[in-house]
Amino acid sequence: MAAPAAFTIIKPHLVRGQGKARLKAGLVGCGGRGTQAVIDLLAGTENVELVAMADVFEDKLERSLRSLREGEMRLSRYVGAEVIRNGKPHRLTEEELRASIPARINVAPDMRFVGLDGYRKLLATEIDIVLLCTPPGYRPAHFEAAVEAKKHVFCEKPFGTDPVGVRRFMAAARKSEELRLTVVSGAQRRFQKPYVETIEKIKSGAIGDIVACYAYWIGTPVIQVKARDPKWTDMEFQHRAWYSFVWICGDQIVEQHLHNIDVCNWVMGMHPVKVRASGGCAWRPREEIYGNIYDHISAEFVYPNGVIMSSHCRQYPQQPGMYTNVSELVVGTRGRSNCRDMAKGGNDPYMQEHIAMVDSIRGDGPYVNHAMEVAESTMTCIMGREAAYSGREITWNEIMMSKQDLFPKDLSPNARIPVPPLPVPGKYQFV
């Protein structure tokens, strides 16, 4: 794993204006997560405004813009949160949030870009920050273009859905470091006070030498549409129901369970070197809206020092009495930790990641670039998925040399996008 960026205070030359002049942000991907990312950014920071938006679908863009402008926002979690304003602690109130956020939504009609090339048009504008919040199949191309445009980036996780795409992301990550661009990921635990402080203590030997890690995400499924509208082409249907298709979501282990696997990689300070896994589809019906992803995967990842990370992710419909668990556990020679139990107090990590990003850009805080670390965690998850799909043990070297490229070559409006069958170990071929 790439070494963490040094804790240096910088004054990046890529900031427009001086002092507290407002930074200009653009959003690519105007669904629920993208809209919430804008709120997280504006709630946590004073001198940032949203000036551009892009989405494949006009209705999503307009719905998001209307929600932000009219204050139709879920703000309860921000009320009472403590931020630093003018060097002093300040607790947010609902009144100021409802007044300040819509006032900084300044997206003119000619700064709204619709279509597959909308992100390129947005990146050509005079923005400072881009929020990349589309489904993850697009992340490598969008991040590469953002780095080429020399924009600072908030990049929702994961960073790709196949090895070819993640290697493309990694190449752009190296360039972002050379340019001293700030890159913050949506792996928000990296900014959550209990995790940050506890993992620092674990790395300092608080529980001795680590001998085992456990990662869990057992919860409910993500089903975005109840049925396919007969008017939808393959392209529109698979984008609106994106969580069901491997090429655009990566399966649960990649899209969701990355949070927990990333914590284990963070604790270990490295990525695993091999994995064996099993999984399947127990409850997801063989119907079109459920696509071709598994509903459970269990994996054993092996780190270079022989430590095993046991990973278990599962989704099933919520019913009374069903077991759920979203957590991590690290076992050491002198104790164990859930990676957040050695700290006092907490914070809102979704807001904190944006505060850290703006502080990094302005030079008011440590330089942050998590592009490579989270890219390696993304590749770790893909390695686990491919081991479960194929029934093979997969090594890091194999996944880094894999030719797998899931991205459709034709995304024209009426193109056919075939859906591969549900993977069957022994028949499915890892390439």
Image (cartoon, rainbow, N blue to C red):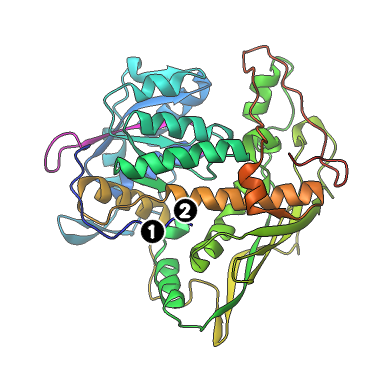
Q: Position of residue 104 (x, y in %)?
A: 27, 34
Asked whether, in this view, residue 215 is left or right of residue 130, the answer is right
Three-letter code for the amino acid on which mark 2 is drawn: Glu
The residue at the point 15 percent across, 55 percent down is 86
When the figure is inspected, residue 314 is found, relative to residue 201, above or below; the finding is above
Query: Secondary structure under badge 1?
Result: loop
**Residue range of the region highlighted in magenta in the rendering:** 15-32
Q: CA distance from mark 2 to mark 1?
A: 8 Å
Instruction: List the residue tagged with mark 2.
Output: 373
**Predominant SS along the magenta part:** loop
Residue 233: image x %, image y %?
69, 16
Residue at the (45%, 49%) spot, across then down = 372
Q: Earlier in the sequence, mark 2 or mark 1?
A: 1
The total number of labels drawn is 2
Residue of label 1: 4
Q: Is residue 357 visible?
A: yes
Q: Which mark is residue 333?
A: none
Could you classify mark 1 by the number of other residues whose Cα lies within 10 Å: few (under 14), some (14-19), or many (20 or more)? Answer: few
Indicate whether 88 appears above or below 56: below
Dot 2: element = helix
Q: Are marks 2 and 1 in contact (CB under 8 Å)?
A: yes
150 to the left or right of 420: left
Q: Quadrant of the C terminus?
A: top right
Quarter where residue 162 is shown: top right
Q: Residue at x 64, y 17 (%)?
A: 410
Look at label 1 and name its amino acid: Pro
| Residue 146 magenta-highlighted | no
Q: Residue 85 at what x, y percent from top left?
A: 19, 55
Q: How crowded is the residue under tag 2: few (<14 C-alpha within 10 Å), some, or many (20+)?
A: many
